[in-house]
Image (cartoon, rainbow, N blue to C red):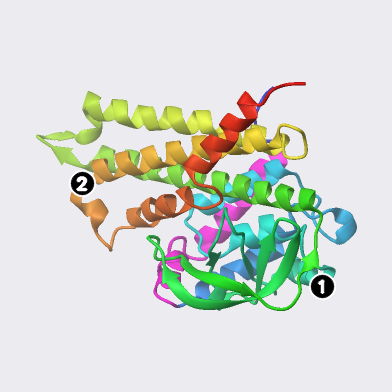
């Protein structure tokens, strides 16, 4: 099986790059972290026009009718540019769970939705700026109100506890687990994108930073560390694409957990090496490197911690066969 994106998926990634870069690139993340969400909201509207929020919505419901691989391609680019906002919740988790009027708003960009999922994503992201908030249980979804914001290690992420308001709407448990695994897949792809950007930044800096009259990238020890990151990211990508292909099948849980573990490990390695390459400058608030380092750290613990996914994977692999 070849895990290679097709021309349409490559074009989608390039279109996302163009839109985000024309909107200022990391400027949206920096202003969002400072409490100015105007730039992030404008980017949200542009990506809605591209069709991002209807990517995995069937054409019969007014969506793009795309695949989970399309979603993975898109979220890798969001991670690469450290785009802020509740994209995983709005584009990956909620489309299959909400009512038709909310779904319509999600697709046209007028709805910015967030959610808490007890046990796997207990805090809602960016509740203060979201138009809709939900608590998703194993068999229901309910509108919710948010409490005070909680700071995250990633300054672009403000977390909140949610409390359900009124009676929730019943959902098919199978639809809920599918939606959660889709959100986990999107998170994995975002980790991969962040890892790729960290590697690119590290390689670029290693070519220009000199010590003892030579670019530090010429030293073999550093080359080996960068190569290890390249290998880790390269091995994580087919696991993510494989999980996307398995999303509707019996191996979904195993594939999604394996992808989250691999993407998290690779991105975390990229963060450590990128920081080592940059040295003290990488710690500074002025340098963009921290945007991806803290994003990786935040995403490692959401949509299932490494321990959660290792445990789920072990249970699935060791389960007796009939």
The reply to whether residue 286 is in sight is yes
Of residue 219 and residue 124, the one placed in the foreground of this image is 124
Of residue 286 and residue 273, the one placed in the foreground of this image is 273
Q: Quadrant of the C terminus?
A: top right
Q: How far, Cα to Cα, is label 2 from label 1?
A: 50 Å
Q: Residues within 10 Å of mark 1 (few under 14, many from 20)?
A: few
Residue with the mark numbered 2: 279
57 inside magenta stretch: no
Image x and y of residue 95, in percent: 75, 60
The residue drawn where x is 61% and y is 57% is 88
Residue with the mark numbered 1: 101
Direction left: furthest residue: 212
The residue drawn where x is 75% and y is 72% is 105
Magenta residue span: 7-35
Of residue 66 and residue 95, the one placed in the foreground of this image is 95
Eye-nearest disc, 2 or 1 = 1
Residue 85 is drawn in which quadrant?
Answer: bottom right
The reply to whether residue 238 is in sight is no
Question: From the viewer's perspective, is residue 203 above or below residue 322?
Answer: below
User: Left of 120 or right of it: where is 34?
Assistant: left
Q: Quadrant of the N terminus?
A: top right
Residue 225 is drawn in which quadrant?
Answer: top left
Question: From the viewer's perspective, is residue 203 above or below residue 80?
Answer: above
Question: From the viewer's perspective, is residue 183 above or below residue 115?
Answer: above
Q: Main secondary structure of the magenta part?
A: helix
Q: Secondary structure at mark 2?
A: helix
First-in-chain label (2 vs 1):
1
Image x and y of residue 89, in percent: 63, 60
User: Left of 303 or right of it: where is 45?
Assistant: right
Image x and y of residue 34, in percent: 39, 74
25 inside magenta stretch: yes
């Amino acid at each position: 099986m070849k895990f290679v994106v097709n021309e349409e998926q490559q074009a989608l990634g390039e279109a996302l790059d163009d839109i985000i870069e024309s909107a200022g690139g990391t400027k949206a993340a920096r202003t969002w972290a400072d409490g100015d969400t105007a730039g992030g909201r404008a980017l949200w509207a542009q990506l809605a026009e591209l069709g991002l929020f209807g990517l995995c919505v069937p054409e019969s419901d007014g969506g793009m009718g795309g695949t989970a691989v399309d979603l993975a391609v898109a979220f890798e680019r969001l991670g690469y540019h450290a785009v802020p906002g509740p994209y995983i919740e709005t584009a990956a988790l909620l489309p299959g769970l909400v009512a038709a009027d909310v779904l319509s708003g999600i697709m046209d960009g007028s709805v910015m939705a967030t959610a808490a999922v007890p046990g796997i994503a207990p805090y809602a992201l960016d509740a203060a700026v979201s138009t809709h908030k939900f608590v998703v249980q194993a068999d229901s979804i309910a509108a919710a109100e948010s409490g005070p914001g909680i700071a995250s290690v990633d300054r672009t992420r403000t977390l909140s506890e949610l409390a359900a308001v009124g009676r929730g709407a019943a959902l098919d448990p199978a639809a809920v687990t599918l939606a959660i695994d889709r959100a986990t897949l999107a998170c994995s792809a975002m980790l991969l994108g962040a890892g790729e950007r960290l590697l690119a930044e590290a390689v670029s800096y290693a070519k220009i930073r000199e010590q003892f009259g030579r670019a530090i990238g010429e030293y073999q020890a550093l080359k080996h560390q960068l190569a290890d990151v390249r290998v880790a990211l390269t091995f994580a990508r087919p696991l993510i694409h494989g999980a996307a292909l398995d999303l509707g099948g019996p191996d979904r849980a195993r594939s999604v957990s394996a992808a989250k573990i691999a993407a998290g490990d690779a991105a975390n390695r990229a963060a450590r090496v990128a920081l080592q390459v940059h040295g003290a400058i990488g710690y500074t608030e002025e340098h963009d490197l921290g945007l991806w380092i803290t994003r990786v750290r935040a995403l490692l613990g959401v949509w299932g911690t490494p321990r959660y996914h290792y445990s789920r994977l072990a249970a699935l692999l060791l389960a007796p066969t009939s």
